[in-house]
Image: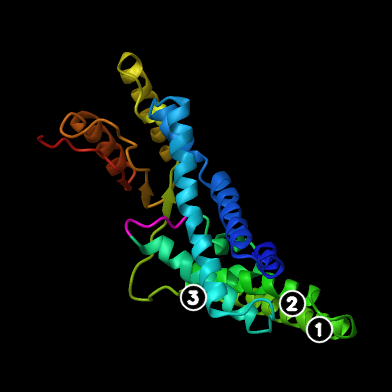
Amino acid sequence: PAFLLWGLQETNSKSSTLKLCFYFGLACFGVGVSWIFVSIHQFGQSPVALAGLLTFGFACFLSLSFVILVFLFRKCHQHRHPSFLTYIFFPSLWVLLEWGRSSLGTGFPWLLIGYSQTDTPLGGFAPLGSVYLVSWISCFLGGLLIYGLRAPTQMRWKRWGGVMSIFCGIYGAGYALQQRDWTQPLSDIPSYTVALVQGNLRPDEKFPEPKVGMHATLQSYALYFHMTRRLQADLVVWPENAVNVPLPAAKSILDFFTKEAQARQQTWVMGIPTETAD
């Protein structure tokens, strides 16, 4: 975000500014949604050219959000004469577009800038305002860097002192928030231990070809079964489609799992597909 804001303030023509934002978005989403190519080509069995074209088109479509950002930024704020308010207005626009991209239609809440701060002190603000607050703070701090870099020579040290004070204050507050427990157990409700099991199977192992289907299916069942038997939790949760045979054909394997869970005084939760009539 800091580099984008710097570019917005350095470019004068509308065309060069729009190109900057479009290429910025294309680079961001071109890398960030590359997994779509793998899904379409490798697992969807589509030709390389078609998968590449669809992925590129999708990245271009998502990049339009940054074009909207620069349009609103230029429309509502005179960026050639930036003030401190510029660095509040910019992150607000950024978060507004993140929210729109995540909410409109089916939503695409990938690559929100706040998620990059999960393991930093800024992640401590998430309980107060979700990922969008963390996104706002991240863009705000990025803007502060530009605010310091663009300071006149005679004010540079004074401005950088203010910038570093804000940085230290925000990171210190985030660290303090991370030390707080935001939930507490209810005394009148018994506690249970819960375990999540993830076999890390590839899609072609979850849904194998018919000629190797039964063998691969039994292997995946054995994997989850042996992983679960090592756990002492009251509730064990398997992934979706851990049992890849639809009901009622899966009744025999479910009966076996049920007996094992009852013998261990556990509850096993798993996702199972069901057949529906056409």
> Which mark is on residue 159?
1
Upstream in the sequence, badge 1 or badge 3? 3
| Front-most of residues 194 and 82 | 82
Identity, as a three-letter code, of the amino acid under mark 3: Gly
User: What is the magenta range?
Assistant: 105-110
Task: Give left or right: position of 160 versus 233.
Answer: right
Q: Secondary structure at mark 3?
A: helix
Upstream in the sequence, badge 2 or badge 1? 2
Pick the quarter of the image with the N terminus: bottom right
Upstream in the sequence, badge 3 or badge 2? 3
Q: Are marks 3 and 2 in contact (CB under 8 Å)?
A: no
> Which mark is on residue 147?
2
| Front-most of residues 35 and 69 | 69
Q: Secondary structure at mark 2?
A: helix
**Residue 82 x, y percent position in the rendering:** 68, 80
Identity, as a three-letter code, of the amino acid under mark 2: Tyr
